[in-house]
Amino acid sequence: MNPEDKFLEELNDLLKKHNIERFTGILHLESVARILAHAPTPEEEKETLAEYFELMNFTGSLKMEAIKALNQLLKLVDERQQSTQVAWERVAHENAETFLSEEDYEKLEEAVILKNAAASVGNLENAAKHREEELRLLSLVVAAMEE
């Protein structure tokens, strides 16, 4: 058994040992890329593998320069989405007092204060809860601005 096959067998055993129900990975071993799928049934593994083989066939037809360019493009898109998120939140915060009722505006201010307080003491669960409320209220602002 070659080292690559041995590694894949050991990885499969490890997935089973730790009761990992689903796993799909593209592993670059020496000069070849291997796809490994692990699912509860062989049929599900075959379905998953078929989709990844289509992807691998597509990417295999691309040159490495094209793949690197695609990765850079995806990173740029992600960065733009993050900056767009920040921009709409900033605009919504700036217009919240105008477009929210007094009660909702007070709830927004309270949610921001509580979110920051929870985050500063490391209570991420409460911070996330208050962040959800903040986003809910900000979405009301955006909806009102669009009308």
Image (cartoon, rainbow, N blue to C red):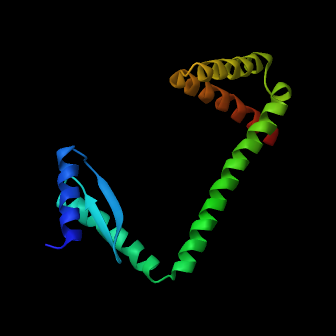
Front-most of residues 132 and 114:
114
Measuring from the top left, give residue 145's x and y in whole percent: 81, 38
Describe residue 129's horizontal placement relative to residue 87 as left or right: left
Q: In percent of the image, x 67 and y 52: which residue is there?
A: 81
Q: Quadrant of the N terminus?
A: bottom left
How many discs appear? 0
Measuring from the top left, give residue 33's x and y in whole percent: 35, 73
Measuring from the top left, give residue 64's x and y in whole percent: 52, 79
Measuring from the top left, give residue 6's x and y in whole percent: 18, 65
Q: Is residue 111 above or below residue 20?
A: above
Describe residue 68's horizontal placement relative to residue 136 as left or right: left
The residue lying furthest to the left in this view is 1
Describe residue 115's horizontal placement relative to residue 124 as left or right: right
Q: Is residue 38 above or below residue 28?
A: above
Q: Quadrant of the C terminus?
A: top right
Q: In percent of the image, x 62 and y 21: which residue is there?
A: 120
Quarter holding residue 4: bottom left
Q: In percent of the image, x 63 and y 55: which residue is there?
A: 78
Asked if residue 94 can be seen in this view, the reply is yes
Describe residue 134's horizontal placement relative to residue 45 as left or right: right
Front-most of residues 68 and 84:
68
